[in-house]
Image (cartoon, grey):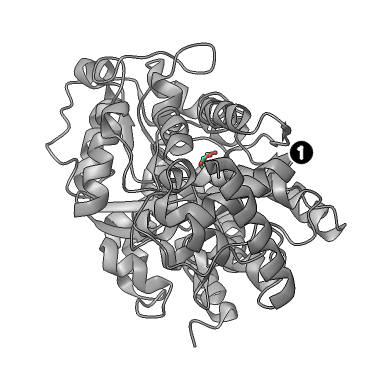
Amino acid sequence: MSKKMWYSLMAVLIVTMLLLSACGPAQTQAPATQAPATQAPATEVMTEAPTGAATEAATEAATEAASGQVEVFSWWVGPGEADGLAAMVDVFNQEYPNVEFVNAAVAGGAGTNAKAVLATRLQGGDPPDSWQAHAGEATFAYADANQIQPLDDFFQSSGFADVLPETLLPLISKDGHPYSVPVNIHRSNVMWYNPKVLEAAGVTVPDGGFANYDDFFAACDTIKAAGQTCLALGPAWTAEHLFENVMIGTLGADGWAGLWTGETDWASADVTTALNNYAKALSYTNSDAATLSDWQPAAQLMTNGDAAFNIMGDWAYGYFANPAPNGLALEPHTDFDWTPPPGTNGIFVFLADSFVMPEGNKNPEGTMDWLTVAASKEGQEAFNPLKGSICARTDCDQSLFSEYSQNAAKDWSSDQVVGSLTHEVVGNPSWDSKVATALGVFVADPTKVADFQTALVDACKSDGTCK
Ligand code: GAL
């Protein structure tokens, strides 16, 4: 019997067995076997056999069945953001030529617009076939609302869990069931800078970055005296991004983590110090921040030489270094450089993008194909070098990555890792939205530190984490 016939026969047998057993969660993807998860990475399971033969047959059955369109929703539209997605879509098109990829991305960094559009679609019973969700609280919220399906079968049959870092698996799992497929790990705490601006002002970045905000503010004073903006900032969500970085740089990793568990007191003097640092950091930013359209124009103030620093996640690396027209094609260390934001040396503030299988989607087989590519080594190796992130998988070929990303990968395994609020790892969407509202009021009048702190204490209380 030929290999192909053997797989086809196995596929028929497995499908029949599963139809007969008809139990377990209402999964719509290709059935998985009960075979124990192997150590093999997902792509190997797909392309090689012996222990995974039945799995491969099931995957082939799904592939043969899939056709039509798969509508994938994200916010990767802007310069630097779209390149990674396009590269992963290329892999998808090669692997699944019968399925048409429909890019339903909605512009707006950090998903500011996309999340609202998605919420309306979900409310109207019109989910995309898959969407971008942050690992952590965002994924839990979709699972809690029964908007997404558990992916146990896929994780088991592909062995995907075996190549995910220990930190990540719990952040996509609820009650032990994985609910999304992480494609990357981004670092939120990077301070990008323009070496030429610093040199002209006579400022040197210490090894490991500025130890604390006082040292950083002293450098900002020098830069200001040289007639330059110290810190480039963009619209509201980037102010929250800056906020979390100042909080972590002042409170430390444990202090920050404790804010979300009730262990750190939001009313404490340490938090007041952090908020004062935040107010002061805002005083060194460009006055037109709120009117900038997104993070890219803010980052570009720095690369253009109109500001010295910009604190932004490492998606900015893709924007700076990728070739034109999407990237700025800049030279690392010459046109731009990087250092940890003040007080965060040895801390890795992370977030991860993942994709989900919705309840009630129109093309579950096509979605399964998309998730298979998102999970695969090939898909992640195409996506991440352009996105500025590192792979969610632990087995990506590091030689494909920039020096920046190779270092980020090392830091990810040696630094103290904490989650981002702005990008939905900690807190939860409703708590985050209360923080964002309070923050918007504060940014408009940063003298009102006490009011801001009270609002933050109240946000924690209304979540139930604080008494
Ligand atoms: C984050 C997302 C990143 C990047 C960034 C800027 O929330 O996880 O992948 O897109 O927003 O838009």
Q: Where does residue 7 sit, x and y in percent of width and height?
A: 58, 49
**Residue 340 in view here:** no
Question: Could you classify mark 1 by the number of other residues whose Cα lies within 10 Å: few (under 14), some (14-19), or many (20 or more)?
Answer: some
Farthest left residue? 207
Residue 183, placed above or below residue 88 = below
Q: Is residue 96 visible?
A: yes
Q: Residue at x 45, y 43 (%)?
A: 43
Which residue is denoted by mark 1 in the rendering?
Answer: 67
Instruction: Indicate left or right for 123 with 323 as reference.
Output: right
| Residue nearest the viewer, comparing 186 with 127 | 127
Secondary structure under badge 1? loop
Which image quarter holds the N terminus? top right
Q: Residue at x 54, y 81 (%)?
A: 461
Count of labels in the image = 1
Lateral position of residue 31 relative to residue 384, left or right: right
Can you give x and y, in whole percent of width and height, for residue 261 in the image?
A: 41, 77
Query: Which x, y percent locates residue 258?
Result: 35, 73
Query: Quadrant location of residue 309?
Result: top left
Q: Relative to 320, is 101 on the left or the right? A: right
For residue 357, which quarter of the picture? bottom right
Which residue corresponds to the image point at 54% horizontal and 32% vertical from the top-left?
A: 88
Nearest the viewer among 452 and 326 is: 326
Q: Vertically, is 340 above or below 321? A: below
Identify the residue at the far front of this view. Answer: 1
* Whether residue 13 is situated above or below residue 367 in the rendered picture: below
Question: Residue sitting at 55 percent across and 23 percent down?
Answer: 79
Residue closest to the eye, 52 or 169: 52
Give the camera-side residue of 262 and 309: 262
Residue flagged by tag 1: what amino acid is it?
A: Ser
Picture coordinates of residue 300, whole percent (x, y): 46, 22
Extreme residue in the right direction = 124
- Above or below 37: residue 240: above
